[in-house]
Image (spheres, rainbow, N blue to C red):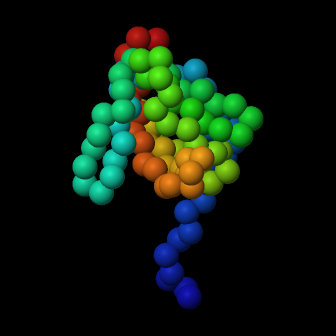
Amino acid sequence: MIFGKKKEKSTSRAELEALHGKRLSSAVERVGGEETVLGRNGGISVSDSELVIVCDGHEVFRCRLEGCIAATLMSGNGVDIKGEDASGRHRHVVAHYSKLR
């Protein structure tokens, strides 16, 4: 197939590690056309094999780095993350950066 659909590739480990320590003002999960607020005031942590988002002192999202796709929002104010959680469910989370540096 010459003009076939491109396969989604995972984001490089270096790009994912650049997210480590980013402070968040909010995190929302997209399911279909709906957005659900997961939490506010948190951060992103990247370990050896997982990316974790914590808001208000509670873990709201965890996915494996393998197969994780992360892209900076066009505004530059956040990141769009797609990945599988521990149960194998595919999740889509948008994390908005805090303005405090």
Q: Residue at x 52, y 45 (%)?
A: 70
As displayed, is residue 61 above or below residue 90? Answer: above
| Image quadrant where one finds the N terminus | bottom right
- Seen at 53% across and 71% down, the residue is 6
* Residue occupying the point 56% across, 69% down: 7
Q: Indicate whether 98 appears above or below 75.
A: above
Q: Residue furthest right?
A: 48
Outermost residue to the left: 34
Task: Measuring from the top left, give residue 75's x and y in whole percent.
Answer: 35, 35
- The residue nearer to you, when weighing 53 against 76, is 53
Q: Residue furthest top?
A: 100
In the image, taking residue 84 as reference, residue 98 lies left or right, namely left
Q: Is residue 98 left or right of residue 82?
A: left
Q: Is residue 51 above or below residue 70?
A: above
Q: Position of residue 44 (x, y in %)?
A: 54, 27
Q: Is residue 91 left or right of residue 14?
A: left
Measuring 46% from the left and 32% from the top, which residue is drawn there?
60
Among the 4 quarters of the image, the one containing residue 55: top left
Q: Is residue 69 left or right of residue 34?
A: right
Say which of 42 and 73 sits in front. 42
Does residue 87 show up? Answer: yes
Q: How many marks?
A: 0
Instruction: Give the residue furthest to the bottom.
Output: 1
**Residue 41 pos. (x, y %):** 39, 18
- The answer to whether any part of residue 18 appears in the image is no
